[in-house]
Image (cartoon, grey):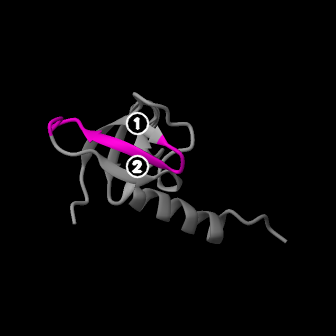
Amino acid sequence: MNFGPMEYTVARIDGDYAYLQQADHPAEELKCVARALLPPEIAEGSQLHYEMMEYTLKNRREKLVQLFLPLKPLLPIHQQSASYTQLQTHGKPDA
């Protein structure tokens, strides 16, 4: 079983099934996939990314990567832990 990553194009939608064409091997037989396994907003011509048994719309995936890639933690993890510990021990108001 191939877990990807692979790129597909929705070649045809027929009821509860979509027929996908692999981008790297367009001459191969179309892959029949239940629409329940695909993003609900697909249409013929949609570009899909497949990885680890999950299909995502390629455009949406690229936008999410662009959105979340620049995010970094405010502090390194070891400093976050220290800050949390300091908050627990020293950050309490005096009673």
Q: Mark 2 — residue?
A: 55
- Above or below residue 5? Residue 8 is above
Nearest the eye: 93 or 4: 4
Query: Where residue 46 is drawn, which disc sits there?
Result: none
- Above or below residue 23? Residue 81 is below
SS state under label 2: strand
Looking at the image, residue 7 sits to the left or right of residue 10; the answer is left
SS state under label 1: strand
Single out the residue that lies furthest toward the right: 95
For the C terminus, the quadrant is bottom right
Q: Position of residue 3 (x, y in %)?
A: 25, 59
Q: Is residue 69 visible?
A: no
Q: Is residue 77 magenta?
A: no
Q: Position of residue 62 (x, y in %)?
A: 39, 32
* Number of residues whose C-alpha sits closer than 10 Å to that of mark 1, classed few (under 14), some (14–19) or many (20 or more): some
Q: Is residue 24 magenta?
A: yes
Looking at the image, residue 91 sits to the left or right of residue 19; the answer is right
Which mark lies nearer to you, 1 or 2? 1
Nearest the eye: 90 or 14: 14
Query: Where residue 12 is drawn, which disc sits there?
Result: 1
Q: Amino acid at mark 1?
A: Arg
Range of residues picked out in magenta: 14-27
Task: Tell me the residue at 46%/33% (across/down).
Answer: 60
Nearest the eye: 55 or 83: 55
Looking at the image, residue 88 sits to the left or right of residue 44; the answer is right
Q: Position of residue 41 (x, y in %)?
A: 56, 37
* Number of residues whose C-alpha sits closer than 10 Å to that of mark 2, classed few (under 14), some (14–19) or many (20 or more): some
Q: Is residue 4 visible?
A: yes
Looking at the image, residue 42 sits to the left or right of residue 48; the answer is right
Callout count? 2
Q: Amino acid at mark 2?
A: Tyr
Q: CA distance from mark 1 to mark 2?
A: 16 Å
